[in-house]
Amino acid sequence: MKVNDIMTQLEVKHPGESEYLQAVREVLVSIEDVYNRHPEFERAGIIERIVEPDRIFTFRVPWVDDSGRVHVNIGYRVQFNGAIGPYKGGIRFHSSVTLSTLKFLGFEQTFKNALTTLPMGGGKGGSDFSPKGRSQAEIMRFCQAFVMELWRNIGPDTDVPAGDIGVGGREVGYMFGMYKKLAREHTGTFTGKGMSFGGSRLRPEATGFGALYFVQRMCETHGIDLKGKTVAVSGFGNVAWGAVTKATELGARVVAISGPDGYIHDEEGVNTPEKIDFMLELRDSGNDVVAPYADEFPGATFYPGRKPWELKVDIALPCAIQNELNLGDARQLKENGVLLVAEVSNMGCTADAADFFTDNGILFAPGKAANAGGVACSGLEMTQNAMHISWSNEEVDRWLHQIMSDIHEQCVVHGRSGQYINYVKGANIAGFMKVADAMMAQGVV
Ligand code: 2IT
């Protein structure tokens, strides 16, 4: 395999799908050497097959707003790779969603899910619908319209959607309700459900908690004490909230959170139950702004239109959206002595920023390793649903610890180069080898 040749062909086939092409290139660069040691992969066309989704559904989602006006959004489900289990991955509702976004997310999800050690293939879906400023009734109607089209293509052993940006417990509830009505079955076809109808304990917290367990392992492995370290977090949604909660519990001090409107600097720390829960209030307001935090807690300052990466911190955790940390930000973080960066959002760093961290010996974890706790807990929800039981907080948390620790170990095994652990390479090789092995065994399909 020659990465540049494959990328040139893909660029011709899928022009303008920049996020998808970025995600594919990152994986191919990491696995090139290992791949070329396996001529049987080349003969079986593994790369050509693994970069293309198994199938994509695209559909119209018409819905009526509270004033009676009709809107039309586009809905998608990308069933990316089903080699190791049913398709599994979230649904994103955000104005920025395109097919390229969901293809990149589905591609990443395939390797992430392989890393969890659970039997899940990769998928992703969503819509360019923006929940911002929409009423509860509008959101319900949109979710229902979305599932009216999608329901025939999903199922507990076929494809199991969950939440992502813009889709939380409320939206999963609405989508599950409509699915149940149409399919006439009460099964684990969605994860992230409410506790009263098959949801798993800890699912809301799992992405952020899992990311911090991963960061904890990175620190232990490199002799860094997490206690007292300063942390900058971007975002203020569910994932950021989980990360802030666990970082604080582990003794670190989170000094920044952010929104599309700018960032909050709270030098004392986002470290009391009132401050942490205020993040949930901000999210529930539906306005997508973080500024009110500074009105509520006068010790904090709001910096409009700026990103938290300009602060001097030990640890940076992008928790919002793809490509939210660029090369300029990476340089600034390094200048300020950052020790560790972990993507809690999917592909939170631009390709050049990620390369900059690894090239400069800064510990850097890619999203597919660091944020896998969310989908891992979804996998545990599927297991509980299939067994018709529900596990306690302690049981799920024990699993989550174990899974994050296993992922870390896989990164160490495949990513070690001398003293430095290249987590990007480690995660990509470990994830790829598992999926490739399953594909080889199943013939050309
Ligand atoms: O990016 C992700 O891993 C998620 N949005 C969670 C997917 C899931 O199926 O729980």
Image (cartoon, rainbow, N blue to C red):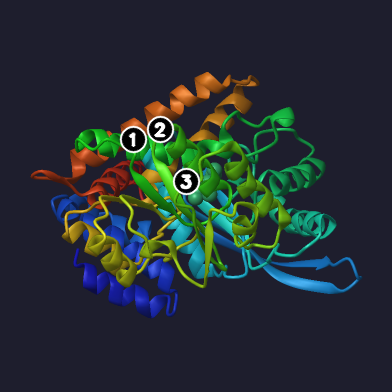
Residue carrying label 1? 227
**Mark closer to the observer (1, 3):** 3
Whole-angstrom CA distance, mark 3 to mark 2, is 13 Å
Q: What amino acid does circle 1 point to? A: Lys
Residue carrying label 3? 269
Q: What amino acid does circle 2 point to? A: Leu
Work out whether residue 291 can be spotted. yes
Helix or strand or loop: what does disc 1 sit on? loop
**Mark closer to the observer (3, 2):** 3
Mark 2 neighbour density, 10 Å: few (under 14) some (14–19) many (20 or more):
some
Q: Position of residue 205 (x, y in %)?
A: 55, 37
Camera-side residue: 67 or 53?
Answer: 67
Q: Position of residue 250 (x, y in %)?
A: 40, 32
Under 8 Å from ligand 1: the CB of mark 1?
no
Question: Residue at 72% across / 56% down in the picture?
Answer: 285
Q: Is residue 253 above or below residue 44?
A: above
Q: Is residue 74 above or below residue 286?
A: below
Kindly indicate whether the residue at mark 1 contacts the one at mark 2 (C-beta within 8 angstroms): yes
Kindly indicate whether the residue at mark 3 contacts the one at mark 1 (C-beta within 8 angstroms): no
Residue carrying label 2? 250
Q: In terms of sequence position, does the residue under pointer 1 or pointer 3 come before the other?
A: 1
Q: In terms of sequence position, does the residue under pointer 3 or pointer 2 come before the other?
A: 2
Which label was assigned to residue 313?
Answer: none
Question: Residue at 29% across / 66% down in the picture?
Answer: 332
Q: What amino acid does circle 3 point to? A: Gly
